[in-house]
Image (cartoon, grey):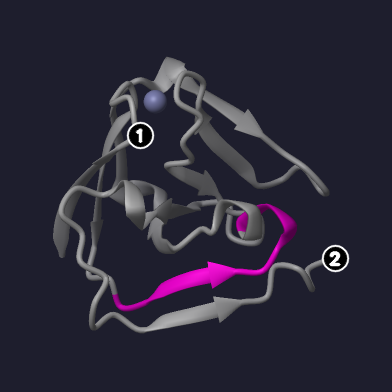
Amino acid sequence: MKTLRGSCHCHAVQFEIESDFPELTTCDCSLCLRKNALMVKVHEDQLRILSGEDSLTTYTFHTHTAQHYFCSTCGIYPFHRKRVTPDYYGVNVHCLDDFDASGIPTRATDGNGMK
Ligand SMILES: [Zn+2]
């Protein structure tokens, strides 16, 4: 397992995750398309919010099960709690420090088809 730190743009929200990065995912739901999100899935035990929890705001839509977090100052999306597997987070890999996505397979997931 690698431990990587991440943050939002203004650094109010800082977190770290553990993952072996077996794959990254994109999603074609109406929200992820707009965010151009590239994500890694981690269990809630593998994500620690180090600071800025009170800066996080949530956005929900459709079934309002998934919790889409964003920083209330800079608006950046660092991670979201998933809908089908709510004990997992999707983490925005572009928020991770020194993350290199090359060589990691990317899988397109079907969010738009989820009803
Ligand atoms: Zn921020």
| The magenta segment | 22-32
Identified at 76% across, 68% down, the residue is 112
Which quarter of the rendered image does ligand 1 occupy?
top left
As displayed, is residue 76 above or below residue 79?
above
The image shows residue 105 at horizontal and vertical percentages of 35, 84
- The quadrant of the picture occupied by the C terminus is bottom right
What's the mark number on residue 8?
1
As displayed, is residue 63 above or below residue 75?
below
Identified at 51% across, 58% down, the residue is 37
Question: From mark 1 to mark 2, how far is it between C-alphas?
Answer: 30 Å
> Closer to the observer: label 1 or label 2?
1
In the displayed structure, does residue 68 sit left or right of residue 11?
right
Asked if disc 1 and disc 2 are in contact, CB closer than 8 Å, the reply is no
**29, 81: nearer the viewer:** 29
Q: Secondary structure at mark 2?
A: loop
**61, 100: nearer the viewer:** 100
The reply to whether the magenta stretch includes residue 100 is: no
| Type of amino acid under label 2 | Lys
In the displayed structure, does residue 9 sit left or right of residue 33?
left
Q: Quadrant of residue 55?
A: top left
Categorize mark 2 by other alpha carbons within 10 Å: few (<14), some (14-19), many (20+).
few
What's the mark number on residue 112?
none
Of callouts 1 and 2, the N-terminal one: 1
Categorize mark 1 by other alpha carbons within 10 Å: few (<14), some (14-19), many (20+).
many
Name the residue at the top extreme: 54
Task: Name the residue that disc number 2 marks.
Answer: 115
As displayed, is residue 95 above or below residue 76?
below
